[in-house]
Amino acid sequence: MATQAPRTSSTVPALAPEREVRWPQRTKAKLANGLEVILVESHTIPKFHGELFFRSGDAAAVDRGVSLAEMTATMLRTGTTKSTSREIEERLRGLGADLSVSAGQDTSAISFAGLSDQAEPLLQLVHELACQASFPAPQFERERRQKLEEVKLERTQPGFLASERLRKILFDSHPYALVSPTEEQVSAYRVDQLHSLYRDFYTPENAILLLVGDFEPAKMRDAIEKVFGTWSGKRPIPRESPVPPTPHGRQVYLVHVPGAVQTQILCGCHAITRKHPDWIKLALTNSLYGGAFNSRLVMNIREDKGYTYSPRSAVNPLCQYGYFSVSAAVRNEVVAASLTEIFYEIDKLRSIPVPETELLDAQNYLTGVFSMGLATQSGLLSQISTLALNELPDDYLETYRQKVRALTPADVLAAARTYFDSANMQIVVVGDRSQIESQGALFGEFKLFDSSGSLIS
Amino acid sequence: MKPLQIPVEHKALANGLHVVVAADATAPVVTVGVYYKIGFRLEPQGRSGFAHLFEHMMFQGSENAAKMQHIKLINSSGGVLNGSTMYDVTNYYEAVPSNALERVLWLEADRMRALKVDDENLRNQRDVVKEEVRVNVMNQPYGGFPWLDMPPVAFRNWANAHNFYGDFADLDAASLADVQTFFRTYYVPNNAVLLILGDVNPTDGFALAEKHFASIPAGPAPKFADPAEPKQSEERRGDVVERFGTLPAIAVGYVLPQRRTADWCAMALLDQALHGGRAGRIYRELVLEKQLAVEADGGIDDIFGYNGPSQMTTRLLHKPEVSSDATLAAFDDIISEIQQKGITDSELEQLKVKWRSDYFATLEGGRGGYMPKYGLMHLLACFTLFDGQPQLVNTILDGFLAVTMERVQNVACTYLKPENRAIVFRKPAAVSQEAA
């Protein structure tokens, strides 16, 4: 359809000269107690964003209990030796602050944001949570019960069921295989386990404090010294974990959800971490494949065929291992057709060099989006945090663009051939068995699970 | 506390298109938005879900940018893009390195001037939208709860009460002629605002807007259906079946005071008192203290972004061994307490500090956190289209900071009453089957 209207230019305007991307200076310090501090100025709004993270999470706690680091994190704000849960929440509100405490596989973290003119009282509260949590028994029983409901609820979410299964396949006896505890495991948590985990993990030697926002670094440094200077504690001894398996051949894992009106597909294989020299090469290759709206996978199974709303691929970088994954929620009739296209696009990138113009487009995309981190305090914090957690070099932000721009079609071909392991991709499909079993079984050796995680056949 | 001084400049082109520029050179990034004053509330009857389906069609090609070109040109300039359909507006937005500003304006102007789509595009996007509804609603525990469950229970005017994502039969019935009519009726420059935020010199911004948009002809002013609701005289209740989740859920929605009145400002702080995270009375009482609920959240969603009847909605998932009646009674106790005793001076002070802090956070990020200045863009657009005053972004806080304890108690008594509310019970099918 075309409406009648006078035209102006029918040609796409060229890009103007680029304005230089200048990353702000990072002020680094280390307190006498071992606490590392990184400060970055960003005056976009009269606020600041921060994170106090500890280099130990659920993976380091796995011998004591599955997801025990997460349970410990949840408990931090429910009481300290100085304040009740209600006092903590009302102090936060009065400071205009947001705060969350969480743990993932590799870290435990207190994340916060507040008004610049209330920075020191917020840091005092963060300090209180980091070293004076008291784990009151009634609150522990309440949070345990909450967790029990949460683990039941997540078993009704197709996305959770898919990622739980893929992690088990790729990581087996490595702690990364365990994304969530069972109800029995939650029931077995004891409050003394939380105390000892807290003592071991939440120490200044194990921590990094990152602040981004509207403040003067010298003054903020003094406030940090005053608030955190007397805290003490050693870095815990790292836990040795078994090496994950390397699955051979495509296998299909169907998680049966009776009555599902759609199928969640999730395929994956081992890849690399952010520390690996090929990381940027793989990031660019992933962006070409399914990491951007304009990528091949999205154009194929969404814009051309209409199989799905939200297909995407990702490289998931945990600290010790990374993996590549492709996901799409598709209508039940096109599960086989969608898998065919997913592998078609993978195999095409593995066999035909990407055209120069398409490569340039993807390079522009990756560098442009990377620089957007500059525009907001939370975006900048997330970049700085990624660097600190992965111990990436100081000039990573400044050199990223040129590293992306230096890549060639041969690099992309090599990255796809190495890390998009088509022949050994593991395939998870979550949906109604009666609608999708025969389609799934076409793609490899077949196993069937129920939504509790048990093998049916 | 410094007053806000966001540099906002505003002009209207001869064809009626509003242009708003807010310059900030912090990062070499520019955010562009085009907002049309039409959302799913006033979409045509018999075409539920059409405003949203149409939003998808706006990415399917225009006179000089064929299908996929739009997305490709933004991504390959180093930018991101999206669109969304809301109650009373539909937006299209991009964040790009600032050297791509003219390209983005050219693309937005091209699709405002002449959408060019065919039957195959429509079939394709109808399929995509159905999968969107399945992934977000039909195949998810508590999908669409309460945003799709509440309107048919709470409202009587079709505009406010229908299925905004669309019944599949209505989506199937949508034709290319409908697309054409909708475009010609609502997607005229005199029903839109263009926003340019971030790394732009205002003079250049206005000149580029003039260059690309000025020749798009104005259309007849769109006629809008009246979204007013007949007066409600008693509490309304409805039931919905939950197919996957195991916990019973309840949503309680109260109709809000008129936009931009003193009561509306007080209602926002009352909302903060009730729903402000773990310090809010509802979470504190129902989850932390009485421990009846597992989840308790909600409140006023996007307070500046609607232009018709709207609600403050509480969302509760409660323990299966607690009855819905007992949960609702505990909720009602919280409401009566605030009606009888009001809030304290120190509580009000905390609420204002938090409200101000949240407002700043909205300006920087807001919905779509990866998009710099999304929140500022959204506020400027709504203040332009609904109020004709984008400058409100610098002053609207004052009304909220002037709210008194008496006014909060007063709105609690006036608006939080049964004849102003609707309740939806979402009951797990699995549990009732097991019990049977």
Image (tube, coloured by chain):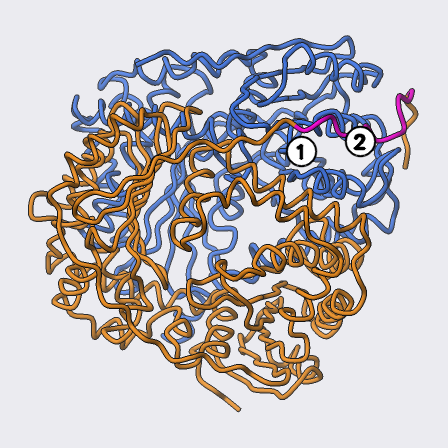
Chain colours: A orange, B blue
Q: Which of the two residues, B239 or B286, is positioned nearer the viewer here? A: B286
* Earlier-in-chain disc, 2 versus 1: 1
The residue lying at 10 percent from left, 54 percent from top is: A134
Report crowding for label 2: few under 14, some 14 to 19, many 20 or more residues within 10 A (C-alpha).
many
Any part of residue B289 in sight: no
Chain bearing tag 1 is B
Where residue A251 sits, quadrant-wise, is bottom right
Amino acid marked by disc 2: Arg
Where residue A20 sits: x, y (%)? 60, 29
Indicate which disc residue B92 carries: 1
- The CA distance from mark 2 to mark 1 is 11 Å
Q: Secondary structure at mark 1?
A: strand
Rendered-image quadrant of the N terminus of chain B: top left
Magenta segment, principal secondary structure? loop
Tell me which residue sits at (68%, 15%) in the image.
B18
Along the line of sight, the residue nearer the viewer: B284 or B240: B284
Q: Find the magenta span and give its range.
A: A6-18
- Residue furthest bottom in the image: A457
Q: Are marks 2 and 1 on the same chain?
A: yes
Q: Disc number at residue B111?
A: 2
